Image: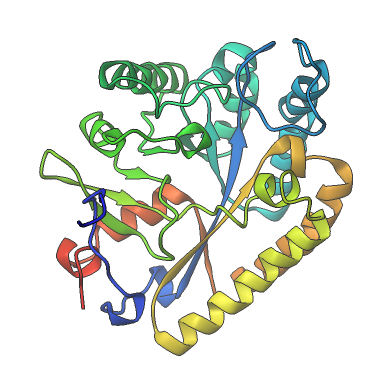
Amino acid sequence: MPLPTHSRYDYSPILHRPPWRWPNDTGLAVYIAINLEHFSFGGGLGAQLALPPPTQPDVLNFSWRDYGNRVGAWRLLDLLKEYEFPCSCLVNSEIYSYCPELLKTFQGEGHEIVAHGRGNHERQGGLAEDEERRLIAEATEVLETKGGVRPKGWLSPWISESNVTPDLLQEAGYKYTLNWASDDQPFWMRTRSGSHIVSVPYPQELNDIPTIVPNRRSHVEFVDMIICNLREMERQVERTGQALVMGIALHPYIMGQPFRLHELRRALDVLKMRQSAEKIWLTRAGDVAEYFAGLDLKASEVTEGGQ
């Protein structure tokens, strides 16, 4: 009996795909994703610095996460300005109710807004289809109304999907999803309408939460991971001619801590040097999706077996 499958794409080995390049004939696109998140007080999900208390409210962990919006995000914003780097902001729509000036400042600096659900205290994967549709519509409407620009990309809180999430996103007008970490290149995903939605690689390992919180690796190791990943991906580009994507996921309550910011500069210095040498395309996730969608590649060549 065959295993259940998602039927969104077929197996496609990366070395058997047609070669292509990013703008300015670069082989590696790099984007920085900063997660701007808000959490319910006294309940729901959330990363934990320490074991939660036996009863709510969990002031320690809630306030640690809230440090990101009050302090850490502002420091990361200043750091991006210093290096003149763009970023993709993965935004809970509840941010507009809690600290709208933070999001307006990121937008004012030209950073991309990516929808990231309503709040990071909830998962959408367990909802009925109509409920999930309403969640997507609510988050989208808030981001569009308050921010003035309809988001083109979506990342589910906790990467939580139902069996119809890609369909609902495509039907809501989304052009790309960051939920699927199954490749180093963008690829087309099938939806029930017959249209496709682009999957842009989002990092689950070059991501400060899994690295530093549950896996208990140091911020120094995390920065080393970023630099090693960059260098190895550049080698792979040179060896194979395949254009690749490298994402870096940061959460302000983690990497916005001063001692971690200090070390993060080491990775940003390397990125700046590679950018100056025109070895990488330092960009935003939405730009990756848009450029890929505009390539003269058939969906079957890059997602559906393309050997």
Q: Residue at x 45, y 75 (%)?
A: 27
Q: Position of residue 167 (x, y in %)?
A: 23, 36
Q: Residue at x 57, y 11 (%)?
A: 97
Q: Is residue 231 above or below residue 223?
A: below
Q: Of 232 and 45, which appears nearest the observer? A: 45
Q: Position of residue 152 (x, y in %)?
A: 35, 38
Q: Residue at x 59, y 78 (%)?
A: 232
Q: Position of residue 64 (x, y in %)?
A: 80, 27
Quadrant in the picture for residue 103 = top right
**Residue at the farthest front position:** 1
User: Looking at the rendering, in which quadrant would you find the N terminus?
Assistant: bottom left
Q: Position of residue 13 (x, y in %)?
A: 32, 75
User: Looking at the rendering, in which quadrant would you find the C terminus?
Assistant: bottom left
Q: Of 116 and 102, which appears nearest the observer? A: 116
Q: Is residue 278 visible?
A: no
Q: Is residue 191 above or below residue 69?
A: below
Quadrant in the picture for residue 66 = top right
Would residue 236 appear left or right of 193 to someone viewing this image? Answer: right
**Residue at the farthest bottom position:** 239
**Residue at the farthest right position:** 259
Q: Is residue 291 above or below residue 22?
A: above
Q: Residue at x 82, y 55 (%)?
A: 218
Would residue 74 appear left or right of 281 to someone viewing this image? Answer: right
Q: Of 163 and 260, which appears nearest the observer? A: 163
Q: Is residue 203 visible?
A: yes
Quadrant in the picture for residue 34 = top right
